[in-house]
Image (cartoon, rainbow, N blue to C red):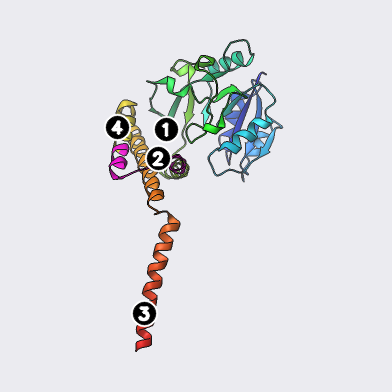
């Protein structure tokens, strides 16, 4: 086995065994557990002894990836997910590249997102965009100084060293999104908070017009350009959710720049309430 599959988990007892079978006897397996409270770890022990604890906020940050790489003994690593299945053809490519004689140091492949049994996101029109951040690569090819949400594993190698697989069912990662409305809102909120802070810290600012334009553009991009319209109702809902997430991210940036975060709001209201109470007490004293 020429590479290591690293799987970050939290309470994944319903999905983890299928994921482990996907890599069993094909790769070394490392589990990084975010202190699960279900049977995730006991299930994982049937497939690997390499199980470690690492606390994170639900999104894998730089510290997570650096910790993961410190555990990997092979030259190549694949950052897997309990939500995904890697087809046999892609596994063969991973093994081929990990042998070290292919001339490539990373493999980039598109995702096929499935919601309610339906393919909802068809953004395969520009595969080149994923060649700067890969799930599979030689472990010394990552540059985490460029890490940001939705681009967690930036590479520091030339494009010529990245093998880009064709966008078809045999050569993409199948992502099964076990999301209903509630889970979607929770996930988007968690990621949105992190992305908004990163964007603000990197100098991005927002305004009402920008918020409107980006939100509307996200909907039409997801629903029309990416083919969500072909997925029926689920495709429409997904486009709305993506637009809402973009709206929330931009509003959070606006909150940062205008000092309207939750702490700011609490402080403003506290001052207003104190002023009102002072007036009440002053009126009582006068009487």
Q: Quadrant of the C terminus?
A: bottom left
Q: Going by the picture, which residue comes out furthest to the front?
A: 203
x and y percent of residue 247 in the render?
Answer: 35, 42
Mark 1 secondary-structure assignment: strand
- Residue mark closest to the camera, 3 vs 4: 3
Mark in front: 3 vs 1: 3
- Residue 183 screen position, x and y as percent: 45, 43
- Whichever of labels 3 and 4 marks the residue nearer the N terminus, that label is 4
Helix or strand or loop: what does disc 3 sit on? helix
Calculate the distance from the C-alpha at mark 3 to the C-alpha at mark 4.
Answer: 53 Å
Mark 1 lies on residue:
115
Q: Which mark is residue 257?
A: none
Do the residues under discs 2 and 4 have CB atoms within 8 angstroms? no
Q: As displayed, is residue 165 above or below residue 57? A: above
The residue under label 2 is 204
Residue, disc 3: 280
Q: Where residue 224 appears, x then y in whole percent?
A: 29, 28
What is the CA distance from the residue labelled 3 to the residue labelled 1? 56 Å
Kindly identify the residue that appears in the image at 44 percent across and 28 percent down.
Answer: 113
Q: Residues within 10 Å of mark 4 (few under 14, many from 20)?
A: some
């Amino acid at each position: 086995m020429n590479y290591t599959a690293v799987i970050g988990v939290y309470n994944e007892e319903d999905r983890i065994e299928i994921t482990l079978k996907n890599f069993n006897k094909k790769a070394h397996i490392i589990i990084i557990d975010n202190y699960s409270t279900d049977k995730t770890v006991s299930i994982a022990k049937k497939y690997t002894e390499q199980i470690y604890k690492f606390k994170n906020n639900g999104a894998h940050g730089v510290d997570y990836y650096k910790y993961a790489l410190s555990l990997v003994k092979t030259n190549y690593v694949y950052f897997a997910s309990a939500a995904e299945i890697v087809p046999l053809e892609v596994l063969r490519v991973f093994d081929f590249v990990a042998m070290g004689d292919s001339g490539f140091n990373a493999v980039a492949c598109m995702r096929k997102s499935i919601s309610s049994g339906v393919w909802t996101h068809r953004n395969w029109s520009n595969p080149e965009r994923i060649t700067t951040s890969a799930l599979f690569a030689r472990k010394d090819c990552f540059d985490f100084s460029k890490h940001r949400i939705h681009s967690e594993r930036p590479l520091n190698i030339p494009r010529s060293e990245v093998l880009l697989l064709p966008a078809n069912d045999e050569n993409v990662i199948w992502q099964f999104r076990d999301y209903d409305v509630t889970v979607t809102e929770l996930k988007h909120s968690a990621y949105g908070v992190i992305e908004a802070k990163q964007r603000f810290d990197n100098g991005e600012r927002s305004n009402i017009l920008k918020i409107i334009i980006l939100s509307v553009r996200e909907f039409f991009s997801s629903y029309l350009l990416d083919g969500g319209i072909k997925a029926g109702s689920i495709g429409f809902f997904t486009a709305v959710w993506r637009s809402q997430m973009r709206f929330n991210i931009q509003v959070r940036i606006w909150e940062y720049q205008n000092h309207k975060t939750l702490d700011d709001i609490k402080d403003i209201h506290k001052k207003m309430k104190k002023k009102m109470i002072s007036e009440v007490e002053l009126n009582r004293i006068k009487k």
